[in-house]
Image: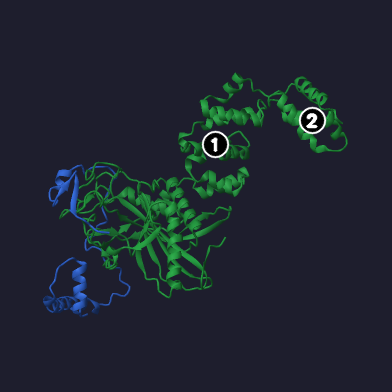
Amino acid sequence: MTYILEGDTGDWEVVIGLEVHAQIISNSKLFSGSATSFGAEPNTHVSLVDAAMPGMLPVINEHCIEQAVRTGLGLKAEINLVSVFDRKNYFYADLPQGYQISQLYHPIVGEGTVILDLDDGSTREVGIERLHMEQDAGKSMHDQDPKRSFIDLNRSGTGLMEIVSRPDLKSPEDVGAYLRKLRSILRYLGTCDGNMDEGSMRCDVNVSVRKVGEIELRNRAEVKNVNSVRFAMQAVEIEARRQIDVYEDGGDVIQETRLFDSVNGETRPMRSKEHAHDYRYFPDPDLLPLELTQEYVDNIKATLPELPDERKARYMGAFGLSAYDAGVLVAERDTAQYYEEVAAGHDPKLAANWVISNLFAVLKEKGVGISESPVSAKSLSKLLDLLKDDTISGRIAKDVFEIMVAEGKEAEAIVEEKGLKQITDTGAIETAVDEVIANSPEQVEQYKSGNEKIAGWFVGQVMKATGGKANPPMVNQMLKDKLK
Amino acid sequence: MSLDNETVKNIANLARIKVGDDKLYHLAGELSAILSWVEQLNAVDTEGVEPLASVVDVTLPLRTDVVSDGDCRDKVLANAPEVEDGFYAVPKVVE
């Protein structure tokens, strides 16, 4: 589906590239031994290196290197065996060094790919231009005091991976799909927790617009402060519309950094960044080039887990699931593991239906993740056992599931306690069928005069008479025989 | 390469160094002289020569991922102009 915005002068399309900053999962910082954990007392996770005291030198964390390589491999990207750290120079209150150590000219990871799973079940490739390592800055709080800003350097020096996409995204939907997929891959790899609320994954959105059919790219604006998937999608819509209005009013879009304001639903220029674009990068003289061996990279490659795309392909191939269902199930590793536990020994499509339709509805209603599910994978699996051996019917199974959610009991105990076992005893079903036929001469007449649709009504009556416990195929067969 | 006054003013601003307009001409001359001194290196033919990152044969030292530092807030904040509840308190950074 193409995303086109109508203007007064014609149709416009949107070109979007994303820069995602993903905090590396590690115990200590990229260049110092202080802790990275979130939520500590201000300025307690700060070493003299992070505070940029004179004479302090950076020493790189080998685990961060491994995490960056692992991520690169997960993005099917080329790993550069030699990469170099550069200084990006700018002044800000939460950047004590006066520069950020980054990798501009020789990043550790080169070109790769992310596959988008779109809502209609189709997929599309988005190019990754590069991934490089850099330091995170500290945090500033501007709203605590009328005259002062408060600075906490706990985050200062934490390892980041900046993942830059090609301008291959064309709609807010693409942006959502990209961020969700990237987050899913990072979580599978265990290299970033992808938590946008806590800021461990953040993104800048580069947006430009052009007339449909134009080949050249026009000037883009970089929108910052976009801290959720939903905001990123909104920011694209709002910024694209703004740029179209500028062009159609005869103006020109200038290349600049803008701030997304979710409260007012607008983007506005960032004044402090006006002169900041000259970062005067140069190789950091405190750090030698980072040299890796192919053997080192291959060893990491050998430990990669099955990633969402491969898992999805397996679910579609071996289990016969639809692209949509498979995509939903593999998005989170926990969900996929839950599903596989339920699917073991059962019809995988039936298991997928139960997880996606019944379980997800409950999780959504309760507002919890699958790890806090009121029904464990094992319990759901046992419920499916009862379905499989015809102890209960599909309809009863749904009732039993509701009771499992409400009371936390096992399916078998509920079935026993409430007497919900399916009636497969021919005699008992026959009695019910005979009774219904005897009490419904009119309907019998209609059936015999050719209205076969009324058969369903008979089934319903028998099920009603047996409290939903009669085995439906048996009821069907018996009715057919008796009404002949 | 020779620098004009405007460039020097911009460099000073980027480096947050206050330079009066009366000093620009003099600084432009000095900085230009330093640049042209370094530019002599351009005379060397470096075709096919790999960049040299260090004159001694060492590789980048690595650190294992353990928490071995930090938790020294008093030291870290000792030079802060002002402290409030464990934060650095600085003149408001307007956005």
Can see residue A6? yes
Packing grade of label 1 (10 A; few <14, some 14-19, many >=20) is many
Chain identity for the colour green used in the image: A
Report in which chain the residue with disc 2 lies.
A
Residue receiving disc 1: A359
x, y percent for residue A419:
63, 20
Asked which secondary structure carries label 2, the reply is: helix
Identify which residue is drawn at 26% across, 62% down: A87
Q: Amino acid at mark 1?
A: Leu
Identify which residue is drawn at 44% across, 61% down: A238
User: Quarter of the image containing the N terminus of chain A?
Assistant: bottom right
Q: Is residue B7 left or right of residue A223?
A: left
Q: Is residue A367 left or right of residue A64?
A: right
Q: Is residue A84 left or right of residue A112?
A: left
Q: Is residue A314 left or right of residue B11?
A: right
Chain identity for the colour blue used in the image: B
Asked which secondary structure carries label 1, the reply is: helix
Q: Amino acid at mark 2?
A: Gln
A220 w.r.t. A405: above or below? below
Identify which residue is drawn at 43% across, 73% down: A249
| Residue A410 vs residue A314, the one in the foreground | A410
Q: Which mark is residue A477?
A: 2
| Residue A43 vs residue A63, the one in the foreground | A43
A251 w.r.t. A5: above or below? below
x, y percent for residue A53:
16, 53
| Residue A458 vs residue A401, the one in the foreground | A458
Who comes first in sequence, dot 1 or dot 2?
1
Q: CA distance from mark 1 to mark 2?
A: 32 Å
